[in-house]
Image (tube, rainbow, N blue to C red):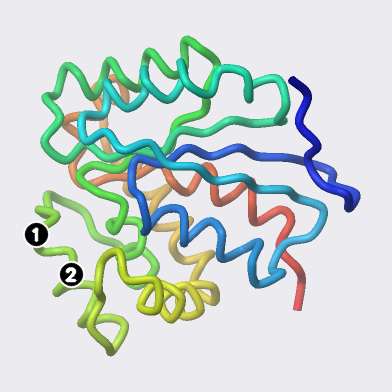
Amino acid sequence: MKRKISKRKVDKSIFIISQGQVTEPEYFKYFQRNKRIVSLDIKVNHENESDALKFVKKSILRYNDYFSNYDECWLIFDKDETPDNSFNEAIKFAEKKKWHVAYSNQAFEFWFILHFELYKGQLHRSNYKNRLTSHIGFQYLKNDKNSLQKLCELLESKLDDAIKNAETVFHSFIDQNNPAQNESSTTVHFLVKEIKNFLKQE
């Protein structure tokens, strides 16, 4: 079943499946919805599964037919309470199936925090809300679309800082083969860098 990407000319297409039902989809849809990107088509779906390994396997099975219709297919998921072995296996399984991975340890909001500071060390996700709120000047409400829209507008000007900080944190870990132990970290910047290539230059 061949899918029509778009009526407009696009140079690249990206299909994203996120573990989160609101935060991640709203973040990535922001770029396209607000016409921040040109010649790039982004499609975002979500799969409701809290365990990282189950999420990866279920997503790849369900959306296998999409793989050939897009230039890149990405899976976005968090470690949260997933056991270390399962989390590492989720990443390996996805990569074996040729899917790109953007994981966060512990959760996606760590990517938001990196827009404002270079944070190294463990930070439990229960502390993300207060830390992020202190940076943005208003209360961060997870899964609230209005709050996320406001946050996305604020984050856009800090995108380069976030990418730089994420890269610094990522390369600070000696053992890159054990991401379950690399807290706090994220690889969301790899996907965002792909999108950034198509952002409008103001």
Question: Residue 141 falls in which quadrant of the image?
Answer: bottom left
Badge 1: few (under 14), some or many (20 or more) residues near its Cα, within 10 Å?
Answer: few
Residue at image location 26% in from the left, 20% down from the top:
88
The answer to whether residue 63 is left or right of residue 105 is: right
The answer to whether residue 70 is left or right of residue 94 is: right
Measuring from the top left, give residue 163's x and y in whole percent: 48, 56
The residue singled out by tag 1 in the image is: 126
* Towards the viewer: 131 or 11: 11
Give the number of callouts.
Answer: 2
Residue at image location 72% in from the left, 48% down from the top:
41
Measuring from the top left, give residue 32's x and y in whole percent: 66, 61
The answer to whether residue 110 is left or right of residue 74 is: left
Instruction: Report the residue that reaches farthest toward the top.
Output: 96
* Towards the viewer: 56 or 201: 56
Tag of residue 84: none
Question: Residue 76 falls in which quadrant of the image?
Answer: top left
Badge 2: few (under 14), some or many (20 or more) residues near its Cα, within 10 Å?
Answer: some
The residue singled out by tag 2 in the image is: 129
Measuring from the top left, give residue 129's x and y in whole percent: 18, 69
The amino acid type, in three-letter code, at marker 1 is: Ser
**Residues marked 2 and 1 touching at CB (< 8 Å):** yes
| Relative vertical location of residue 71 with respect to residue 104 in this rendering, above or below | above
Q: How far is disc 2 from disc 1 in space, using C-alphas? A: 7 Å
Screen quadrant of the C terminus: bottom right
Measuring from the top left, give residue 175's x and y in whole percent: 25, 25
Q: Is residue 14 visible?
A: yes
The amino acid type, in three-letter code, at marker 2 is: Lys
